[in-house]
Image (cartoon, rainbow, N blue to C red):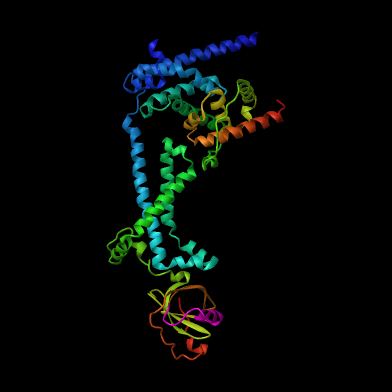
Amino acid sequence: MGEHLETDEAVVLDVQQGNAEKFGIVMERYQAKLFRYGRKFLSDPENISDLVQDVFIKSYQAIQSFDTSQKFSSWIYRIAHNSFVNELKRKQKAPLRIFDFDTLLNHPVYEEEHSSEEQVAIKNMIDIGLNKLDPKYKEVLILHFIEDLAYKDISDVLRVPTSTVGVRIKRAKEALKKVCDITNI
Amino acid sequence: MNHINNFTKENQNTEQKAKEHMLQVLDQIKKGKVTMTPRFYFTLRFTALIAVSVLLFIFSSFFFSFLFFALQASGYYFLFGFGLKGFTTLIILFPWSLFLIQVLLLALIEWLLKGFSFGYKTPLAYLILGIVGISMLLGLVVYLTPLHDDFESEAKHNNLPVLGGLYDHVRRPSHDHGIYNGTVIAISTSSIMVKIDDAGDVATDTLVVMDSAALQLSKQVSLGQGVFIAGEIDHEKFIPYGIHITFTPATPTQRPEFGSSSEEFSAQPTY
């Protein structure tokens, strides 16, 4: 039981040093979270389950590249994010996004604090209007409001500047509000 | 009620499947079917980043220093002052192949940097401006050294492989684009004669500016002066769109006794 109180990073350090069985703890901790994250991108539970298994395999294979001074959750979410987005693109046959102008310059940004009522309202709006949003807005909303990741951690997951995350969240909220207004929600 | 039962059943199935998947992964790890990629493989990316960075800065400092050197040696920087035509010619004469290599190296370094938090946390424009700024400074430092003079000298003796071609005509502006370095050898109200330095590929070594252009230029230049001149050929006449005096001799040269009629300067340039 004691080992379950270890931080993710400590557990991963053990795995890196050869204690492969401890990877089971990592999987237990992230199975449900990643599955829930996958549901926001894909609808077929079987497919999500297969992808989550694939994420664990990829994570184990690349575990030596993880820097234990960083946050493990951002690292594994990054792998999961890529898997889900790639699957989504494959299914939608979406064009490849080569360059994003949001990442070009620094944007002044501050992390907004939301009251619990606001959080609930935004989560409800996300549940209803999410599928009508551009994927780049969709992903930041999920990571921030559903997965509770801070801007800095989202920046690590998406590999974009923190200021870009701020700008996208601001625009995503505006887009979501517009969708909800149009559909009278 | 049935709907709720189905939903609960689906959830139980999913949970069961997730557990099976976790056990499968652990089993594959135990059996050695899934293995960790060794750490050195990941450090290779970092090594590649360092190597490409070094290569980029070496190449960039060469690229910018060569630009400064070539602009100064050929006199092309005078084209900046020759209006739109001069600027267009400068764009045409730009070493685009070197620029393309520079852009490819920048794209490669940007891609490699994406794997590191420093790379993706810094906005792209700042990253590129930073690299280009540092490269220009390095280029300026290299330009102030005798490196390019030495390279040019080696190239003249065919001792500079690969880069030798860059220095072939670095001191002679492109005659194909109507740009010449020369010395004013005769002036009249209707024509001006310029003796072309290093005539090389032109049949005559004298350039003749006639008619109104000559009249205008005759007020600007005097005999013996070195000039950088750019123009176009129209009906076998050289029509300059820009001239810059590159040097004035210490002792002014006497105006030659050519008379004032244009017939005396009837020789047409052949290109």
Q: Is residue A21 above or below residue B206?
A: above
B117 sits left or right of A42 in the view: left
Is B211 colored magenta in this rendering? yes
Up/down of A131 relative to B63, above or below = above
**B240 and B100: which one is in front?**
B240
Magenta stretch holds residue A50: no
Query: Which quarter shows the N terminus of chain B?
Result: top right
Segment tinted magenta in the rendering: B209-225
- Name the foreground residue: A108 vs B139: A108
| Residue A100: x %, y % from top left | 53, 40
Q: Going by the image, does B4 lie left or right of A106?
A: right
Residue positioned 43% across, 42% down in the render:
B110
**Which quadrant is home to the C terminus of chain B?**
bottom left
Q: Quadrant of residue B39?
A: top left
Name, please, the residue furthest toward the right.
Answer: A184
In the depicted structure, whether residue B74 falls above or below residue B118: below
Image location (x, y in percent) of residue A104: 52, 43
Residue appearing at x 31%, y 62% in the figure:
B146
- Image coordinates of residue B135 in percent, x first then y, are 40, 51
> Which one is in front, B26 or A116?
A116
Q: Which quadrant of the figure has residue B75?
A: bottom left
Q: Is residue B129 visible?
A: yes
Specify whether residue A93 is in view: no
Tell me where residue A103 appears, x and y as whole percent. Answer: 52, 40
